Amino acid sequence: MKSEREKMLSGELYDPLDAALIAARERARDLCQRLNEMREGQPEGRRRILVELLPCGGDTASIQPPFFCDYGTNIELGERVYFNFNCIVLDVCPIRVGSFTLFGPGVHIYTPLHPFNAALRRREEFGKPVAIGSDVWVGGGALLLPGIRIGSRTVIGAGSVVTRDIPEGVFAAGNPCRVIRAITE
């Protein structure tokens, strides 16, 4: 029988009040709090927290506090990913971010979803993974919704709500976010 964590990561309905999941979220919140309280003048301390919070890429990530996430362990970052101030990453399903990707201030990345059925929603939720390519720039205040993919070398305009996949090498913006034009060198 699958654990609630295994069900969560595979996108199945799971119980978010499972004791092991609560403990994992508390761990992440404690690490986020410690990170958010540290000054830039403490680079070794910040780096240790990032590696513990984000074991898959925290060693080269640059994050401006405050930063918040559900688990941290479900976030996979490529080389030198940058999160500006006040980003929120809800990682109940895997979130994969390619190298050299930049997130503006206040960007939110969501993977959790809730059933439309109210009785089911009281006790279970599910999620869909998010994948973001390399060399992507996501403008401030953008919302990236569950299940989306953003191709490499794409720019997402500030304040956009990304509800569906965006191909590589384009500028996309709006609510809902749509391709505006190809990016040419």
Image (cartoon, rainbow, N blue to C red):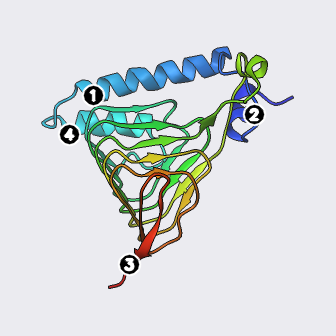
For the view shown, which residue lies furthest in the left direction?
41
**Dots 4, 1 in contact, CB < 8 A:** no
Q: Which mark is residue 36?
A: 1
Against 57, residue 124 (above or below) is: above
- Mark 2 neighbour class, 10 Å CA radius: few under 14, some 14 to 19, many 20 or more: some
Per the model, the C-alpha gap separating discs 3 and 2 is 39 Å
Q: Mark 1 vs mark 2: which is more N-terminal? A: 2
**Dots 1, 2 in contact, CB < 8 A:** no
Depth order, front residue of 35/64: 64
Amino acid type at mark 3: Ile
Q: Is residue 36 left or right of residue 51?
A: left
Amino acid type at mark 2: Lys
- Residue with the mark numbered 2: 7
- Mark 4 neighbour class, 10 Å CA radius: few under 14, some 14 to 19, many 20 or more: few
Per the model, the C-alpha gap separating discs 4 and 1 is 13 Å
- Mark 1 neighbour class, 10 Å CA radius: few under 14, some 14 to 19, many 20 or more: some
- Residue with the mark numbered 3: 183
Front position among marks 1 and 3: 3
**Dots 1, 3 in contact, CB < 8 A:** no
Per the model, the C-alpha gap separating discs 4 and 3 is 36 Å
